Image: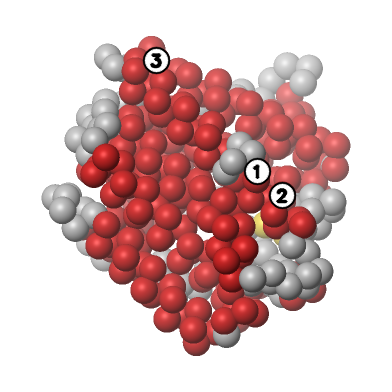
Amino acid sequence: MEMREELKKRTGEVESIVDSYLPAEEGYQKTIFEAMNYSVRAGGKRLRPMLMEETYHLFGGTEKAVEPFMAAMEMIHTSSLIHDDLPCMDNDELRRGLPTTWKKFGYDMAVLAGDALMIYAFETASRAFAMTRYPDRAARAIQVLAEKTGIYGMIGGQVLDMLAEHRRISETELRLLQKLKTGCLLRAACELGCAAAGKTDAESIEAARAYGDKLGLAFQIEDDILDIEGDEKTLGKSIGKDAASEKSTFPSLLGLDACRKLAGELTEQAVAALAPYEGRAFLETLARSLTGRRS
C-alpha cells in the first residue's frame, strides 16, 4: 500500500477514535458542543494522535487506554487553533477550507469553545484510568500532556509568538518560539506514547523526545515555506499572513533554499533517533512524507 493510501486509512481510524469522545450536541447549552465539534471535525492531518499511537506501539504498548489520550491531544491542538484564529491573535477567517470558529459561531462562543476543548481534553484523558491495568502510566501521561500544553509549552510559545510581531528576532529566539508553540505538542505526542507504554528508561524517553523535537521543527519550517509558496485553495487557509504581521520566520531569517536544506536535515535527525527500534518503518516514512509537502 502506498504511503498516501496508508495515511488516508490511518487518518480515518484516528478520526473515528477522536469522534467517539466528542460530546453529544444536546441540552440547553448545545451551542458550545456544536462549536467544539465543528472545530474538531473540520479535518486536518490528525498527525499528533497518529504519532502518539505509533510511538505507543513502537515502545510495546498494547492497551486501548491510549485512545482517550489520542482524542485529548487532538482536542488540545484544535483548542489552540481556535484561539490562534481569533481577531486578537492571527485574525484568520479561513481554516481547512471552512470559516474559522469565530466566524461561524461568533467571537464569544469561539473563546468559550477553545477553553471548553482544553478542559474537556483532560476530562477525556482521565478516562484512561478505567481502561488500564497500569494507573501509574496513565498518571505520567497526563503529566506530560499538561506540561507540554501549558505555560512552559504550547501556551508559552503562543506568548512568544505574540511578542515577536512587528519586530525582528534572532534565529535562537525563533527556534525557542517554535519549539514551544508548534513543537511541544508533537513532542508531547511521542513522549506521551512512550510514557503510556510504560517506558521509563532514559534511552527510550530521549529517543521519543528527539524524534518529536526534530520533526516538530522541520514541520514548522515547512509551514513557513508554505505561507510563502503554498496555494490558498490547497492549504484551505490564508497565506502571506506572516509577512503581513511582520513576523520573523525561518525563510525571512535564513532564506528559502537554506530552509529546505534545514528541514531535510532535521527530518533525517528525527529518523535517526528511532534507529535502534524495530517497528519504526511507518514513523520514518511519515517523517519524510512531511518534507516538501503541499498542504
Q: Is 121 left or right of 239, judged from the image as shown? A: left
Residue at mark 3 to residue at mark 2: CA–CA distance: 33 Å
Q: Position of residue 125 (x, y in %)?
A: 48, 25
Q: Position of residue 186 (x, y in %)?
A: 46, 49
Q: Which residue is mark 3?
A: 129
Q: Is 61 left or right of 82, judged from the image as shown? A: left
Q: Which residue is mark 1?
A: 155
204 vs 63, nearest the viewer: 204
Disc with the residue nearer the chain's start (3 vs 2):
3
> Can you tell which quarter of the image residue 245 is in?
bottom right
Residue at mark 2 to residue at mark 1: CA–CA distance: 6 Å
Disc with the residue nearer the chain's start (1 vs 3):
3
Q: Position of residue 28 (x, y in %)?
A: 78, 17
Please identify, in this view, whether the residue under mark 3 or under mark 2 is nearer the observer: 2
Q: Residue at x 61, y 57 (%)?
A: 177
Q: Tell me the element at label 3.
A: helix
> Can you tell which quarter of the image residue 80 is in?
top right
Mark 2 vs 1: CB contact within 8 A: yes
Q: Establish if 258 lies above or below 31.
A: below
Q: Residue at x 47, y 27 (%)?
A: 143
Residue at mark 1 to residue at mark 3: CA–CA distance: 26 Å
Give the amino acid at mark 2: Val
Q: Is 155 left or right of 164, judged from the image as shown? A: left
